[in-house]
Amino acid sequence: MTATDTKQYNAILEQVGDPEKAQPMFLRWKCQTDLYFLGTEIFGWKNAHTGKKWRIDPKFHGWMARLMQKEEDCLIMVARKHLKTTWKKAKIVQSVLNYPNRRRGLFSVTPRLVEYTLADICVMLCNPVLLKLFPDILRPPGKDFRNWEKKTHNEVTVYRDSAFGYVPQEPQLSALGNLAKVQGLRVDECHPDDILDDSTVRSAALMDKCEDWWAYMQSVLETDGYTQMTGTFYHYSDLYNKIIKEGHFPKSRIYVRPAIVNGKIQYKTWFTWKELNRIKKISGDYIWSCQYLLNAVPKGMEIFPPPQPTFTQLPPDEYRYYITVDPAATVHDYSDDTGITVAAVNKQKQIFIVESVGIKKRGEDIARFLIEKCVQYSPDRVGIEFGLQVDLKYTLEHMKAEYENRTRTKVKMNILPIPISSRVSKVEKINMSLGAYIRLGKCRISEKCVDLIRQMDLYTGKGKEKDDLVDSASLIFATVEGFAVGHWTQGLDNFMQGMTMRDLFKRKQGYSWGGEFAHYTAN
């Protein structure tokens, strides 16, 4: 027993004065508050094994159970065959024990799969220990579950009592496939579990259907309810990645745990290196990367192969600062953010990205934010790819003058308009500038720039990846003196596959930055 358990038991014992009465009351409390205990002790999963391989890994599944027993919006991404659906079943049982009058929705990729899950949950609700501990909430099923209030292939209500509050008309648990019609359904808890599979990511149209279903689901959940989504990646543009990119869940509540972390197997009581290597060999690199490494952009497709080069603190040196801005065309919910990057460049032309943020604001708010950054960093240049946002330049000039008059201070803001080039594609430009510099080890990113690092990890240029921060960071090369876009695109008309950055610069003999760059590549 933990210190908390001991304290709770002593409080119960003091209340009832009889150990025989205190024990079941304590066990009841323990089942309601400790999901790992409910699964391992009450359902007996701690004894599940095949030979010397044990199904429950205390460390890994303890982590998963602690996350699932929370009642808050979250996304939990776990590798295949790691028992996430098993623990999801226990989570729903625990919810029934705590809140018998709540309405829950369980959703999965197909009706048949979710009905199998519902059948398992019904068996778990018949556990004899739980029936004894919770006689006010659970009922013995009787023949064909006739003692329960409702039991069909996709709806279940064991028992409800107005003593627990308002009794809604919807069942305690509804189980539906991910494309089922949900009009008229209302739930207090939404539990999408494995709502995607390989069949749902075979075309953009199918992925759009999943996104539409998710959008409609927002009207099914009550405003004071929560969604706990569990799954595994299938494609770099699937619904899970869309949810992460667009921030449908708070960043602090998105949990991604691959089968292997820092060279260590996470589910070590069940998997061995031999077994994981066998799965990798049979499934192939892409499926292995999605399903077990939880990286939907496998090696070979990445422009920025992870891990990205980071720094904790800017090394002591003399730096010149630059700010780059990639303005969003609109500020709608579905639009990109305006990407803003702050870079420090030393005399050796090494780049340190110290800030990278995405903001969804209008012109005046963007201008105000940029003025604050200019006051903070005194940049040599502010490179802005105006595009459709030509009015932003005048807004900046007006608000800068207003700020200077109000504060009687001079703001260093040397704006460099960056034209949108049609000579090369955006992907080529990013790959040959920021991508090349990253691969050469001449650019580092502050470890605080987690959103930029995440975008770089997933960026291929082939899908719907969120790339506003990557775009902004790549504008550094058109902003810094000597990195100008006209310089680093020299010779692109004759661009050939396999051309290196050294090839790109060799025509300009004696050019100072080119010489320094060649020196770097030689080291």
Image: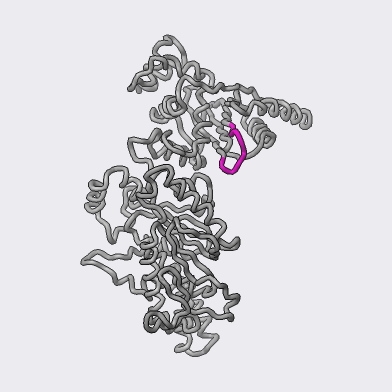
* Residue 519 appears in the figure: yes
Q: Position of residue 325 (x, y in %)?
A: 58, 30
* Residue 315 appears in the figure: no
**Which residue is found at the position 27% from the left and 57% from the top?**
271
The residue furthest top is 509
- Nearer-the-camera pick, 105 or 6: 105
Q: Position of residue 19 (x, y in %)?
A: 46, 88
Residue 360 placement, left or right of 209 = right
Residue 4 placement, left or right of 403 = left
- Nearer-the-camera pick, 425 or 499: 425
Q: Is residue 177 within the magenta segment?
A: no
| Magenta segment boundaries in residue numbering | 327-334
* Colouring: one colour
Residue 308 placement, left or right of 248 = left
Q: Position of residue 345 (x, y in %)?
A: 52, 26
Q: Quadrant of residue 76?
A: bottom left
**Which residue is found at the position 52% from the left and 45% from the top?**
246
Q: Quadrant of the N terminus?
A: bottom left
Q: Is residue 328 within the magenta segment?
A: yes
Query: Does residue 40 sit above or below 489 in this rendering?
Result: below
Query: Does residue 439 sit above or below 230 in this rendering?
Result: above
- Nearer-the-camera pick, 465 or 506: 465
What is the magenta segment's predominant secondary structure?
loop
Query: Does residue 403 sit above or below 509 in this rendering?
Result: below
**Which residue is found at the position 33% from the left and 70% from the top?**
45
Q: Position of residue 90 (x, y in %)?
A: 41, 69
**Which residue is found at the position 50% from the left and 67% from the top?**
104
Q: Quadrant of residue 440?
A: top left
Query: Does residue 332 sit above or below 496 in this rendering?
Result: below
Q: Quadrant of the C terminus?
A: top left
